[in-house]
Amino acid sequence: MKNRGVSTYMLREKCGIDSKTVRRLRANENVETKTLDKLCSALDCQLQDIVEYIKD
């Protein structure tokens, strides 16, 4: 987000991601795939740029 100049305000107000979801993202908690889609659109990136799979 910092590299792209995107603030949490922009995520909430312009991308439709609510503050609860922003909190979950910061805490590395589960989010819905539609949220990941919105993030990729807002940041103009691919899914692999914002997520990492870690095996349990």
Image: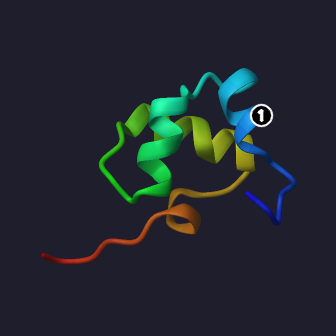
**Disc 1 marks which residue?**
10
Left or right of 9? Residue 29 is left
Q: In the rendered view of the protein, which quadrant contains the C terminus?
A: bottom left
Task: Work out whether residue 4 or residue 13 is closer to the camera in this orientation and state it.
Answer: 13
Task: Work out whether residue 16 or residue 27 is closer to the camera in this orientation and state it.
Answer: 27
Task: Work out whether residue 41 or residue 13 is closer to the camera in this orientation and state it.
Answer: 13
Q: What residue lies at 73% left-to-right and 57% top-to-bottom? A: 1
Residue 22 in the image, given as x and y percentages of width and height: 53, 41
Residue 11 in the image, given as x and y percentages of width and height: 68, 35
Most extreme residue toward the bottom, as rendered?
55
Examine the image and state in which quarter residue 8 appears: top right
Residue 25 in the image, given as x and y percentages of width and height: 47, 50
| Amino acid on which the number 1 mark rests in the picture | Met
Most extreme residue toward the right, as rendered?
5
Examine the image and state in which quarter residue 42 appears: top right
Q: What residue lies at 62% left-to-right and 22% top-to-bottom? A: 16
- The total number of labels drawn is 1
Is 56 drawn above or below residue 35 in the view shown? below
* Mark 1, other Cα within 10 Å: few <14 / some 14–19 / many ≥20: few
